Amino acid sequence: MNRYTDDFSTDPKILGDHLKFNSGREAQNRFLKAALTERLSTFDPQNLTKHGLPTQKLLNTYERWGQGGFGVVLTGNVIVDSTHLEYAGNAIIFKEGDSEERRELYKKWSSNIKKDGTLAIVQLSHGGRQTPIAIQPHPFSASDVQLVTNPPNHGKPIALTIEQIQTEVIDRFAYAAKFAYETGFDGIELHGAHGYLLSQFTSPTTNKRTDKYGGSLENRLRIILEIYDAIRKQVPKEFIVGIKTNSVEFQSEGTTVEDAKEICKRLEEKGFDFVELSGGTYEKFQFEHQRESTIKREAFFIEVAETIRPVFKNTVVYLTGGFRTTKAMVEAVSSDVTQGIGLGRPITAEPDLPKKILAKTVASAPKNAFDPNNFTHSLFGCITQMEQMGRISLEAHPEIDIMTDISDFTNTETANRYLEVFKDYITNRNIDKSKDFGLLVFD
């Protein structure tokens, strides 16, 4: 397997340090399995009790990450409103679909993650205006600013009323957090980044309101702080409540670094257990390097993180996006830019990467043969690898080598063959719109 480096000169010991949260809970090391869009849950909007249920493939996938040596494992988008998904195949927690079956599946999910001492955290999200038009033609948002993409895939949003903000957003997030607690998860992360609903409120690009939820930064942040308070009333103190927030949005009128710094100051004051720093939106989704100076240090948002980091005193900080080598991870922690290391795309190719780094058997992540700045190819490659990870249960087949059934996209021939299949998939999907919710499977 091709890797970024085989240089073992950097000692990874510091990455194995425990991290303690405000709640009193501890992560067994600094590694965070970042949220990824798995799209491995059921999609049945006509039958709410069967809609958004975790499948066995999803449970199997997280069984692998649960044994991968992470301190914290985040789920992908778990949606709090069944009509506002990130994509078909999202897991959902919502009162209208509550059932014993859903609860048992979530209990199994949390159990699979926690087997080796890893903390299991549900990422709670709401698609808002980023909900695909085929799922919701008129999605809720902070304002009626439509998301423009090419090809167009999102409807004209409806601005939430103050009453709806309470009933359709705050109450739903609080309900989902309580559900997560009751089904064995150790905490939740609010998805307040990447252009989803909560960041639609915090960003001036999408928030044009003139009431108490718009205008000043204090007003734009209000919904997140009210969700935090509502959740805290539903769960015990030791239940972890974190948030993913944008460090910068890279677009006109978007959240600036100074805005992000002030937002993070308020999150620290409120008492969030952790903040995961990321960046970008659907319109400017920058999981790539913006400056030559960040390439050497690997993390996409490391320079803005340096500006924001001083506001945190008690809140644990994770930085996600771009880390590939032990050296860069250790340097980021040693220089106090971040306390934790978030890993996303590399751990679909190698779900036990943290365990291997800490054991000094590898010094870096697999280096796939895709164009590093083509996020679409990388995204679908990861989705395919997750589907492959989910085909076999390690509990049922402990003798299986977890790497044998995952496509090795570090191999140029394999990667090129995949891109041919991907090209056909996209072409056919554009011809037949019934395939909009398809999953590209590659054997």
Image (cartoon, rainbow, N blue to C red):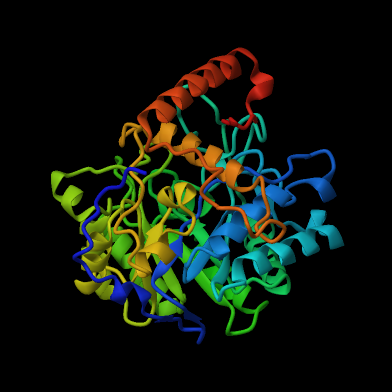
Residue 186's x, y, as percent?
A: 60, 74
Q: Residue at x 74, y 43 (%)?
A: 42
Instruction: Judge left or right: residue 269 versus residue 435.
Output: left
Tally of numbered discs:
0
Q: Residue furthest bottom?
A: 24
Q: Residue furthest top?
A: 431
- Quadrant of the image occupied by residue 173: bottom right
Depicted 284 relative to depicted 237: above or below? above
188 and 332: which is toward the camera: 332
215 and 366: which is toward the camera: 366
131 and 100: which is toward the camera: 100
Q: Is residue 150 visible?
A: no
338 and 406: which is toward the camera: 406
Residue 139's x, y, as percent?
A: 62, 39
Residue 200's x, y, as percent?
A: 47, 49
Q: Residue furthest left?
A: 293
Q: Is residue 405 visible?
A: yes
Depicted 68 relative to depicted 256: above or below? below
Depicted 376 relative to depicted 419: above or below? below
The quadrant in which the C terminus is found is top right
Q: Residue at x 40, y 55 (%)?
A: 215
The quadrant in which the N terminus is found is top left
- Quadrant of the image occupied by residue 419: top left
Instruction: Judge left or right: residue 125 versus residue 342.
Output: right
Residue 49's x, y, as percent?
A: 84, 50
Q: Residue at x 19, y 50 (%)?
A: 294
